């Protein structure tokens, strides 16, 4: 098909779905890494929360620091799919190691397996996201491509949340089974995406100095404003993601419900994702995003009042806050894809910014990981100082405060900033 004829036709649904398929195993890998690993190593390997928090912070900072460099590498590669193919076998090995902690040498094993997993995940994700930005030819199509990727990602998260509990009542055994299921699923979905997604539009790989190009990306005011909102909103999401299993086990005293709560949260995100895409078309993506933040704030504001046995109340909170999740995952990423494919400031013609798309997504992923690093590196030692110990039902007030109140504070700031900057965030390049 010629380039002109391709531009005249919308991407078929099957190609949209094929592109999004790889999002399933990538998200399936992310949930255990960020949610299950802290508790797995605290209980199975007997690591202290302070040591665990410090190791997670160090590994995540190292991981986040290389994301822009990986984005620059992606921009200098003729086909981003080659980097995806390189990264996926390393990701499979890293996941198998990470979810099988040894009895001896757990700290070194944790660091090594995390660094391998993080590197492979980051390389695949940055190349995959930048590839999607190139495939979309207008804002609507980039939003649909992003929604396909994130929709499959939510399915992957649901599988990662539910399968360990279905495989075994023992969380460590359940995670072990999850790791072995992950490997063939990764292979299958990667083939679907690499063979079924539309061919990339021809582009000229970036040829300038790597660091210069990365700093030039940060010179985009619209990108900096979007990144600022993403930072604050991401902290609000990262804190409860790190602590949810502790909250369920020791505040609600309903450890057996942990997988069900996570599944409900992410299924709700899947179910409501089309609504946010529809609202974004009618009212604008920023307005829909702010509305989703308001829903999350309203839903989460009474979690502080919950105690032992309040499983149904917490299920309602998971349902409502999960409803806002689809917007959080799709709308800011779609805005970013527009920026990455936009016109240069003051230029009447579209420059070859697709060569720099990897740089934009590299910085974006750096910020997302810094949020998670800060959540683990600060919240876990803070709980340690407050006297909280996993399994102790008598000293959970500090856990409730960090889990419930801090996210509300950051989410409110994010909503105010997004609304204040809505015109520049939605501006047409």
Image (tube, rainbow, N blue to C red):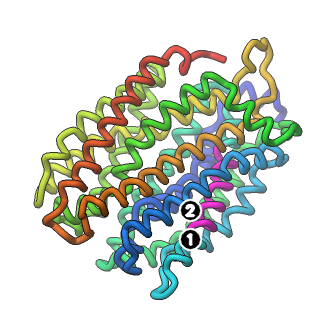
- Foreground pick, 322 / 100: 100
Q: Is 277 a magenta residue?
A: no
Measured from the top left, where is residue 26 in percent x and y? 56, 57
Measured from the top left, where is residue 56 in percent x and y? 49, 63
On screen, residue 232 versus residue 398, left or right, reads: right
Residue that numbered label 1 is attached to: 111
For the stretch drawn in magenta, the main secondary structure is helix
What number is the disc on residue 59?
2
- Foreground pick, 383 / 85: 383
On screen, residue 133 versus residue 311, left or right, reads: right
Q: Give the vertical position of 9 relative to 102 (above or below).
A: above
**Number of marks:** 2
Element class at badge 1: helix
Q: Does residue 262 appear anywhere in the picture?
A: no
Determine the residue positioned at 83% across, 48% down.
77
Determine the residue positioned at 24% across, 41% down.
300
Element class at badge 2: helix
Determine the residue positioned at 72% across, 17% down.
345
Q: Quadrant of residue 358?
A: top right
Q: CA distance from mark 1 to mark 2?
A: 7 Å
Q: Does residue 182 appear anywhere in the picture?
A: yes
Quadrant the N terminus occupies:
top right
Measured from the top left, where is residue 388 in percent x and y? 24, 64
Q: Quadrant of residue 25?
A: bottom right
Mark earlier in primary sequence (1, 2): 2
Question: Dots 1 and 2: beta carbons under 8 Å?
Answer: yes
Q: Is 124 a magenta residue?
A: yes
- The magenta segment is 113-129
């Amino acid at each position: 098909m010629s380039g002109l004829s391709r531009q005249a036709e919308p991407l078929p649904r099957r190609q949209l779905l094929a592109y999004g398929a790889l999002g399933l195993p990538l998200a399936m890998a992310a949930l255990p890494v960020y949610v299950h690993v802290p508790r797995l190593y605290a209980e199975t390997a007997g690591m202290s929360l302070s040591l665990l928090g410090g190791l997670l912070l160090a590994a995540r900072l190292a991981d986040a620091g290389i994301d822009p460099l990986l984005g620059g590498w992606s921009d200098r590669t003729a086909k981003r799919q080659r980097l995806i193919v390189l990264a996926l076998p390393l990701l499979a090995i890293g996941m198998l190691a990470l979810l099988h902690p040894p009895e001896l040498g757990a700290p070194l094993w944790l660091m090594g397996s995390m660094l391998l997993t993080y590197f492979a995940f980051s390389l695949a994700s940055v190349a995959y996201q930048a590839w999607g930005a190139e495939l979309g030819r207008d804002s609507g199509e980039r939003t649909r491509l992003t929604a396909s990727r994130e929709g499959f990602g939510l399915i992957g998260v649901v599988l990662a949340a539910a399968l360990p509990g279905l495989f075994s009542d023992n969380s460590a055994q359940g995670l072990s089974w999850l790791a072995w299921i992950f490997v063939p699923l990764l292979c299958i979905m990667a083939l679907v995406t690499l063979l079924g997604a539309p061919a990339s539009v021809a582009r000229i790989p970036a040829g300038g100095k790597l660091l210069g190009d990365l700093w030039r990306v940060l010179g985009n005011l619209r990108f900096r404003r979007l990144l600022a909102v993403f930072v604050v909103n991401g902290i609000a999401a990262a804190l409860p993601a790190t602590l949810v299993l502790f909250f369920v086990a020791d505040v609600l005293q309903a450890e057996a419900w942990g997988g069900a709560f996570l599944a409900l949260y992410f299924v709700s995100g899947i179910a409501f994702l089309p609504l946010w895409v529809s609202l974004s078309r009618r009212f604008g993506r920023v307005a829909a995003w702010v509305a989703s933040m308001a829903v999350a704030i309203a839903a989460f504001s009474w979690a502080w009042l919950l105690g032992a046995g309040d499983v149904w109340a917490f299920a309602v909170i998971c349902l409502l806050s999960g409803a806002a999740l689809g917007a959080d995952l799709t709308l800011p990423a779609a805005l970013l894809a527009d920026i990455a494919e936009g016109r240069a400031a003051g230029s009447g013609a579209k420059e070859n910014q697709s060569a720099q798309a990897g740089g934009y997504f590299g910085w974006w992923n750096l910020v997302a990981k810094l949020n998670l690093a800060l959540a683990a590196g600060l919240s876990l030692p803070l709980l340690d100082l407050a006297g909280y110990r996993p399994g102790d039902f008598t000293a959970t007030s500090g856990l409730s405060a960090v889990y419930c109140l801090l996210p509300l504070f950051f989410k409110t700031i994010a909503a105010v900033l997004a609304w204040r900057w809505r015109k520049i965030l939605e501006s047409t390049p």
